[in-house]
Image (spheres, rainbow, N blue to C red):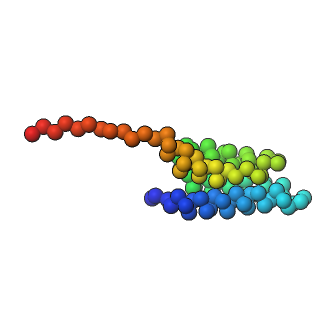
Amino acid sequence: MKKDKYKLLRRGVLYDLVGAATYFIPVVGPFLDIVWAPYAAKKMSEMYEGNTGKIASVIVFLEEILPFTDFIPTFTLMWLYTFVFAKADKAVQTIEVEVNE
């Protein structure tokens, strides 16, 4: 199943905004991060499969659980890595085929 990359971007920006919003709620915000961090990690692993998704889910968990790091847009950075930077690394591979007649 191929996921729509712009749908992933919209969801990622929304999750980044929710994660950042807890930073601005005094007193209660840090306690909301305890609930939000595992949920964000689960969503990250669902959005991006494979080893990169697993690594990103650990990173987003740590970013959300650690104090003063809620402003980092981890979901958006993962989208940029997946659809902008990682695509540039992939070179076109040509396979030569010999046909015997």
Name the spot of residue 43 as percent of width and height, x first.
63, 56
Name the spot of residue 99 as percent of width and height, x first.
16, 39
**Is residue 51 shown to the viewer in this render?**
yes
Looking at the image, is 21 positioned above or below residue 94? below
Q: State the residue at coordinates (80%, 59%).
A: 22
Residue nearest the viewer, comparing 42 with 15? 15
Looking at the image, is 17 positioned above or below residue 96? below
Left or right: residue 1 compared with residue 60: left
Name the spot of residue 91 as percent of width and height, x first.
43, 39
Name the spot of residue 18 as percent of width and height, x first.
73, 61
Q: State the residue at coordinates (70%, 57%).
A: 16
**Is residue 45 shown to the viewer in this render?**
no
Q: State the residue at coordinates (71%, 49%).
A: 61
Number of marks in the rendered image: 0
Seen as rendered, the residue at the extreme left is: 101
Determine which quarter of the picture holds residue 13.
bottom right
Q: Quadrant of the N terminus?
A: bottom left
Q: Quadrant of the C terminus?
A: top left
Left or right: residue 29 compared with residue 18: right
Determine which quarter of the picture holds residue 42.
bottom right
Q: State the residue at coordinates (50%, 59%).
A: 3
Looking at the image, is 50 positioned above or below residue 46? above
